[in-house]
Image: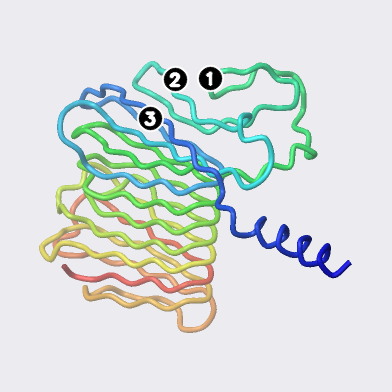
Amino acid sequence: MRNQTIIALASTLLLYVVPARAQVTRFSPTLRPGQHLSISTIDGDVTVSRGDGRTAEIVATKIVRKGDGTRVKAVMESTDDGYRVCTIYLHRGEPDRDTCASRSRNDWNGSDNFDVDISYVVTLPAGALLAVHTVDGNIDVRGTDTAPSLHTVDGSITYSGVAPATLNTVSGDIHATITSGDWAADATMRTVDGSIDVSLPAGIALTVKGSTVDGDFSSDFPLTVRGKWGPRSIEGSIGSGGTRTLRLGSVDGDIALHRR
C-alpha cells in the first residue's frame, strides 16, 4: 500500500513538472507603406519592433496548458488594405477554418474549457500601419514610424516611437516614449487601474489635456493643474502649443510627463 501511495504521489508531481506544449506558426506578408497590419488575440502578449525590407515577420507561439490545442490557432487573412492576423477558437463541432470570422451558428460552449495562450512577436516594415488588440496580455511596441492603435484589457503597454493614435488599457500601466516632435494627429492614452508615464522630446510643441480621479500629476513641463481633492484635471501648452493635442486619462493612477 505504501509503494502504491509513493507511485501515486510521484505521478502527481510529474503532472506539475511537465512543461506546457509550445507550437510555433509563422507568417511573412509583404506590406507597402500605408498598408495595415492588424494583430488580435485573447490570451497572450504582443511584441512589435521595426524591421528592414518590405516583409513583415510574424511568429505566433502557442502554449497549451489544458484542452484541445488543435482547436486554437493563429490564422492570417488578407484585407482591402493589408493583412489581419488573429487567434481563433473553434467551437465543438465547428469545421476547421482559416478566417478570423466564424461562419458557425453554434454558440460558444463553456465546456470547451481551454487554457491556451498565443503570443505574437512581430517585425514591422517601415511605413506600415499597426493595430493590436489583446484581452489578457501585455503589449510592447518599439521603433514604429507610423501612429499605431494599441488596446488591451488586462495588461500593460510599453511603447516607443512616433506619437501613437491610441494607447488604451483597463488594468495596467502605460509607459510611452515619443521619439519625434512631428505629430501627424492627436494622441490618446487611457487606463482605468494604472498609471501613465510619458517621455516627450524637449523641444516639442503641443496641447496637453488630462484627468485622474485617484492619482497625482507630475510634469517636467509647466502646465496648469485644476483640482486638489477628488477628480483632478490638467491642461496646458508645451512650447508654442502647436496644433496637436495629447489626451491622458486614468481613474486609479498617476500621470507623469518627462522631458527627454
Which residue carries the number 2 mark? 77
Where is the N terminus found, in terms of image quarters?
Answer: bottom right
Q: Dot 2 surroundings within 10 Å: few (below 14), some, or many (20 or more)?
A: few
- Outermost left residue: 203
Q: Is residue 194 above or below residue 179?
A: below
**Label 2 is placed on what type of residue?**
Glu
Q: With 95 as the anchor, is 43 left or right in this view?
A: left
Q: Dot 1 surroundings within 10 Å: few (below 14), some, or many (20 or more)?
A: some
- What's the distance in space between the residues labelled 2 and 3, CA to CA? 13 Å
The percent coordinates of residue 48 (x first, y second) are 32, 44
Which residue carries the number 1 mark? 99
Mark 1–mark 2 CB contact (< 8 Å): yes
Q: Is residue 113 above or below residue 26?
A: below
Which residue carries the number 3 mark? 26
**Label 3 is placed on what type of residue?**
Arg
- Outermost bottom residue: 228
The percent coordinates of residue 44 (x first, y second) are 50, 47
Foreground pick, 170 / 2:
2
Element type at mark 2: strand
Element type at mark 1: loop
Element type at mark 3: strand
The percent coordinates of residue 192 (x first, y second) are 53, 62
Residue appearing at x 20%, y 38% in the figure = 51
Q: With 8 as the anchor, is 251 left or right in this view?
A: left
Q: Is residue 17 above or below residue 102?
A: below
Where is the C terminus found, in terms of image quarters?
Answer: bottom left
Residue appearing at x 64%, y 46% in the figure = 115
Q: Looking at the image, is mark 3 or mark 1 earlier in the sequence?
A: 3
